[in-house]
C-alpha cells in the first residue's frame, strides 16, 4: 500500500481526489492537508464522507507532509504549489501538481499569463506534462508531474492526431470550449452564485484565457509549425463537465502531400488504439457531458465534410480534467495498472 | 385596434405571442386557434393566463380565421403553414409566418433540408424575410412575412456588418451556436426530458442543421461571394436563450483593399446605429443570456485580435428569435411604432 | 405622474421594482439610490435595462431622496430602513418599507428575532401591514406601509380564511415552505453558489425562522386564539418562487358549532371573491411555481379529506412576495387602480 | 461469484443496478434483460458503460433468465413483476422485486391503489419487505424480497423509532415529501420535459399517492395503533434525491407514561446504533440531497421543540430508494458483508 497525501484537500478537486483514493485498492490516504479546515474532521466538512473516512484535516506543513506520504497530490491554487515542490522533491517524494505552476517549459510564458513571478524555475525542467496519451513513457520515470489543465486536456486530445499528422492548417484552428461551474473552483464570487449561473450562459476571457499557451505549447511540439489556436471558453449552468467543439480546415493537398491513412476517423482510431480512457464515438454520434460525468473517459466524436473537420471532445473537468488524470498519472508513476481505481 | 389571431397557439412560441399581444396597446386578440386545445379555455391550458384572458381556443379553420382577423400569426410546424397562407392572402389578410415554409427564395433548398415538397411555390416570391435590421423597407409593404429562424437571427445579426463590407474570408466562417431547450418546441421526446437535459450539454445536427441554408442565403445576398458557414448547434440546459460565438478570419489586405472605416466595433456601431433592438456591448464586455431573457434585444460583443474577429450574439430564442420579432414585423407592417409592446 | 424613488436599488427586489415601475403608466422614476453602485449608470450595472433607462444610481442620502420623490420604496436590509423612515415621514413622504423593520406591533418580538434593537419604535404604530387582502382599507390611508415578508404572504393567504372562521385547530398547524434562491437576496455566501444549490435541496432555520412571529402575529389577530405555527423553510434549486404546503386539522364539531358555509373551497371562494391577485385552483388542481413566475398572483389549491385540510399556495417571492406587492400597496395608497402596472 | 441478472434493465433503476453490480466484488452480471433494447449492446444504449461492459441486452424470457442467474433483480413496472416471480421461485431462484407487486400483506390494498388485480396472491405471504433496518432477519432467509418504495423508505426510517416507542400521536402525522424527477422513471410524458420541470416546483397526488398505504402498513405493524399519515409528494427540479420533512406531535404525558429514554435524538441513536447506512446528523444539523447523492445512506436530522418533533430524512431515490437497497438486500440474503459494493 502506497502512502499518499492530498494538500489543499478542501476544494472541489481535493474532494474528488479523496473520493477516488478512498476506493483505490493500492493506496492508503496517509494525510489530508488543508489550511482552511485544519483540525476539523473530514466527515464534518464533507458530510458525504462521514461514516466512511476517519481522517482529520492537518495544517499543510511541508515537513509533516513529507514525513507521512510517499506520493503527494498538490491540489493548491496556482503560485502556492511551487512553495512545496522543492522541499518534497528534495526528500525524495513523488509529486503530482494539479496547479499550473510546472506546466510551462518557458517560465516567462507562465509569468505572463499568470501574472506572477516563478519562484522555482530550476525544477521546471524536471516536470513532465502529465497527459498520458502523449507522454506516458516520461511520466513513468517522473518524480514531478504537472497535471494538465482541464481545458487543455480536452483540446489537446481532440487535436493531437490531426496536428501530429500535419493535415490541418495551424492558423485557423478554433476551439469553442464550454465548462461547468466547478471549473472555477470553490471561489466565493458573485458571478458564480446560483441566481447568476442558473439559466445563463456566457463567454468569458474571450481569447485571453491562461490555458491558451498551454494548448499551444503542447500542440506546437507535435507539429512542424507553431500552433496558435483561437480559444473562447464559456460558462455552462451545470456543475461538472467540459465539452469542446474544435473546428479545423484542411491544408490544400499538394503534390508532395503528407498523406492521411484512410479517413480522419481511422486516424483517430489508430492514434488512440490502446488508450484505456479515450472512447471514439461511432460515425454520426457525438459526445455528451452525461456520458463522461464521474468518469476518467474522454469521449471524442468527429465530423468530416469537404475541407472541414469538426472534432468534439468531452470530459469530466474534475476527473479526466483534474483528479482522475492525477490518479492515472500516479498509477503510471508507481507501476500500478493504469485503470486501477478509475473504473 | 387591429384584430389579430394566432394559429397554433399551443406551442411555446404561441404562448409568448399571446403574452406579447395581450400587453400590446394597439391590437385586440380576436382569435386563438389550436387543433390540440380547441374548445378549451386559454386560462385552463395555460394557467398563467387565468384571470387575465377569457378566450377559448378555436379549431384552426381557415375561413373562421379569416373572418375574425386582420393579421394572422402562423405559429405552426413546418409544412402546415403553407396550407393556410394561400387562402389568407386571397382574402386580403396580412400574414406573419413563423415556420420555415416561406424563408427560402429557392423552394428546392427548402425541399432538400426539410425533406418535404413545397405546396405553395407561387407565394414564395411574395414573402419578405422578416429581419427588420436588413429588410425593414420591404417588410413595410409586405403582405406575407417569413419570420426568421432563431439561429439565423443571431447568426446573421452577428455577421451582417462584416460580410457586407467584405473584410472577412467567406470560406472559414465558423458559427458555434448554443440554444436552450425551448428551441425544440413542445415536442414529446425522451431526449428533452428533464433528466436527460439537466446537467448535460451536447452538440446535435453537427453541420447539417436546416438553419444553415437560411443563414447562407441571407449572408450571400449581402456579400459579393457565396457564403458557406460551418455551423454546429448545441443544446443548453436552460429554458430560453441562444448565444452564438462566431469566428472570422480577415482577408489579407492587398493594394486595392476594400477598406474598413475604423475599427470593427465602429463598423458595427455604424451599421446598427438606429436599430432599436441591437445593443452593442462595450469593448471587453460580452453578452449573456440573462440580459436578453424575456426581451426582444440582440446583444452583440466583439473581440478583434490580429487577423481574427470573434463576434458573440445573444437573443431570447422565443422573443427576438420568434414571437417578439413577429410582433416587431407586425408593428412595421401596420405602421405602429416599432418598439410598441416590446419594451 | 407620481415621482417615486427606490432606495437600495441594487438587490434582486430593487431590480424587479425598477422593472415594474418602468412599465407603470402613472409613475415616474425620479431617483434610484444605491450605496454600492452610486454614480454608475443603471444600464451598466443591470445590462437588461440598457437602452431602456437613462438613470444613474445616486448615493442614498435622506435629504436628496426626499427632495426628488413623493413616494419612496425602501428595498434595504433589515435595520437600515429605520434610519430613513423618520426623516421621510417628517417631510410628508409616503413610504413602502420592504424590510422587516416595521412589521411587528411589539418591537420586542422584532428585537428577539432580528437580534438588534429597534431605533424608531415611535413610528411602529403608524405602520400598516401591507397585505391588501386583509388590510386594504388601512393601507389606503397609510403613510408608512410595512410590506410583508415573502413567506408570510404565502402562509397567511393560505390560512386566513380557515383561521378567521375558526374551524381548524390552532395548535397543530404545519407550514412546509419552499423558496427559490433569490429569497436570500444578493448575498455573497458559499451556501448560495451554483455548485452548492444546483441539484440540492435542504431545510434551514428549522422552526426558528424570523418570519414565524410575523405569521403568528397576523393570524392571531384573525383568530380567537393564539396561533403558533410549526414552520420549516427549504431552499429550492430555482431562482424565483415560493410554494407552501399547509396542513391543518379540523376542530371536532360540537353541538354549538361555528359553522362552515359549504365546503372549504367555498369558504376560500367567498373570502377572496373580489381579490384581483388571488386565483383559486379548481378542485383537484394545485399551484405550481411556473404559473405565478413574474406575476403578482397568489395561486391557491385546496384538498379536504376527513378531518384534514391541505392548502397549497404559490407566489413569486420577488413579485407578490416583495416588489409586486409593494407596487400594489402604492396603487392603493395613491388611489390608482389596484392592478395598474401589475398585469 | 454469484450469477445475477437484471430484468427491466433499461430504466433509471436498472441503469444504477448495472453500475452497482459492475463494481460489486462478489457477483457476476450473467444477464441483462430488456424488452425495449433486446439484442442491443449495453454500451450502445448507455454510452457511460462503453469500454466497461460487453454485455448485450436479451429478451426477458423467464426460462432464459432462470437458466443463467442465481439471483434475479426485477426492475420492472408494477404488474409486470408478478408474471415472472412464480416461475423464478419455482426454479429455486432468489428474487429481489423492485416493483410494488409484493409489498402489501393484503392484496386488496394493492388492487385498490394500483388499480389492477393481483395475479399471484399465493406468493405474497412469502415476500419479505426489504427494509433491512426493520426486517434484516427475515430478509436473511427470504427467497422473495419486496424492495420498498422510495418515499416509504425515507418516511419509515424517519418515523420508525418514534412510532415504535409510542410517544407521538398517530392521528396528526404529516409527511411532506420532495423527490427528484428520476423518481417518475423514464416515462415519456410532457409533464417531465425539461422546460416543464426546470425552474418549477409543485405538489402532485396530494394525499392520494400509492405509497401512502405502504407507509401506513409498515408503521402500523410497529405501533399499537393504526397509523394514518397525511402525505403530500412534490416534484423537485433535480435529477436524484428524496427529502422528507416529517411533523409529529407528542402524546400528552399521563401518569403511567410510556417513557422516552433521554431525548428524541438519543432514541434515534439507540434505534439505529449498528445500522451501516443510517447517518444521524448532529444537533442543529440537517440532511441535504447532495450529501446522499450516489450513496446508499439515509441521513436523518431531528428538531425537538416543546410538544413537536420534526424529523428530516434524505436518501438517493435511485440508491437507498431502489437499486442500492436491492443490492443491500442481496448482500443480506447471500451472507455477503452488508456494505459490500455499496461504499
Image (cartoon, coloured by chain):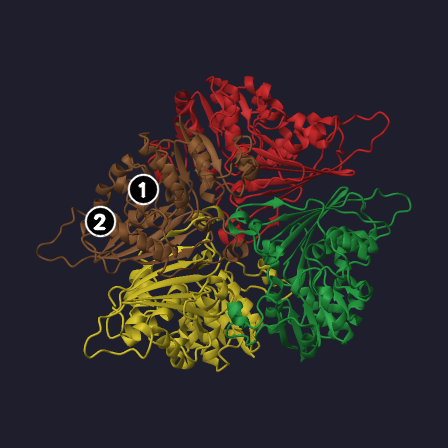
Chain colours: A red, B green, C yellow, D brown
> Which chain is home to disc 1?
D
Quarter of the image with the C terminus of chain D is: top left
Q: Is residue A300 left or right of residue B47?
A: right
Q: Position of residue D96 (x, y in %)?
A: 37, 39
Q: Position of residue A41 (x, y in %)?
A: 34, 35
Furthest residue in direction left, as rendered = D255
Q: Quadrant of residue A317 in the image?
A: top right
**Mark 2–mark 1 distance (CA, rounded to whole Å):** 15 Å
Q: Position of residue C95 (x, y in %)?
A: 44, 74
> Which chain is home to disc 2?
D
> In the displayed structure, would residue B15 be above or below residue A213?
below
Q: Which callout, 2 or 1, points at the residue further toward the start of the chain? A: 1
Q: How many marks on residues?
A: 2
| Mark 2 and mark 1 residues within 8 Å of each other at the beta carbon | no
Camera sees residue C116: no
**Residue name at image x 66 percent, y 77 percent:** B26
Mark 1: secondary structure: loop
Are discs 2 and 1 both within one chain?
yes
> In the displayed structure, would residue D47 be above or below residue C187?
above
Specify few, some or many for label 2: CA neighbours under 10 Å numbering under 14, 14-19, or 20 or more.
Answer: some
Specify few, some or many for label 1: CA neighbours under 10 Å numbering under 14, 14-19, or 20 or more.
Answer: many
Q: Is residue D69 left or right of residue C305?
A: right
Please name the residue that numbered disc 2 is placed on: D222
Q: Is residue C273 left or right of residue A80?
A: left
- Given residues A324 and A287, the one toward you in this image is A287
Please name the residue that numbered disc 1 is placed on: D130
Amino acid at each position: 500500500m502506497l502512502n499518499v497525501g492530498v494538500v489543499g484537500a478542501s476544494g472541489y478537486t481535493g474532494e474528488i481526489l479523496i473520493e477516488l483514493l478512498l476506493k483505490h485498492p493500492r493506496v492508503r490516504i496517509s494525510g489530508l492537508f488543508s489550511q482552511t479546515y485544519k483540525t476539523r474532521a473530514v466527515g464534518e466538512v464533507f458530510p458525504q464522507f462521514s461514516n466512511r473516512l476517519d481522517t482529520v484535516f492537518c495544517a499543510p506543513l511541508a515537513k509533516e507532509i513529507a514525513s507521512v506520504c510517499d506520493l503527494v497530490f498538490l491540489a493548491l491554487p496556482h503560485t502556492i504549489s511551487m512553495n512545496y515542490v522543492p522541499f518534497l522533491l528534495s526528500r525524495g517524494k513523488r509529486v503530482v501538481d494539479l496547479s499550473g505552476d510546472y506546466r510551462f517549459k518557458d517560465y516567462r510564458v507562465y509569468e505572463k499569463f499568470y501574472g506572477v513571478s516563478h519562484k522555482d524555475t530550476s525544477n521546471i525542467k524536471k516536470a513532465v506534462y502529465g497527459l498520458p496519451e502523449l507522454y506516458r513513457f516520461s511520466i513513468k520515470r517522473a518524480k514531478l508531474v504537472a497535471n494538465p489543465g482541464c481545458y487543455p486536456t480536452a483540446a489537446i486530445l481532440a487535436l493531437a492526431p490531426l496536428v501530429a499528422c500535419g493535415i490541418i492548417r495551424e492558423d485557423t484552428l478554433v476551439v469553442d470550449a464550454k465548462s461547468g461551474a466547478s471549473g472555477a473552483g470553490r471561489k466565493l464570487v458573485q458571478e458564480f452564485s446560483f441566481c447568476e449561473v442558473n439559466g445563463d450562459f456566457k463567454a468569458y476571457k474571450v481569447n485571453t484565457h491562461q490555458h491558451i499557451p498551454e494548448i499551444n505549447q503542447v500542440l506546437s511540439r507535435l507539429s512542424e509549425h507553431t500552433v496558435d489556436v483561437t480559444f473562447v471558453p464559456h460558462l455552462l449552468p451545470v456543475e461538472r463537465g467540459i465539452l469542446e467543439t474544435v473546428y479545423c480546415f484542411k491544408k490544400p493537398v499538394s503534390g508532395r502531400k503528407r498523406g492521411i491513412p484512410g479517413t480522419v476517423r481511422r486516424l483517430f482510431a489508430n492514434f488512440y488504439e490502446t488508450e484505456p480512457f479515450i472512447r471514439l464515438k461511432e460515425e454520426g454520434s457525438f459526445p455528451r457531458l452525461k456520458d463522461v460525468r464521474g468518469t476518467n473517459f474522454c469521449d471524442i466524436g468527429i465530423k468530416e465534410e469537404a475541407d472541414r473537420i469538426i472534432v468534439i471532445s468531452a470530459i469530466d473537468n474534475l476527473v479526466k480534467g483534474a483528479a482522475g488524470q492525477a490518479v492515472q498519472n500516479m498509477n503510471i508513476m508507481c507501476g500500478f495498472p493504469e485503470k486501477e481505481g478509475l473504473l
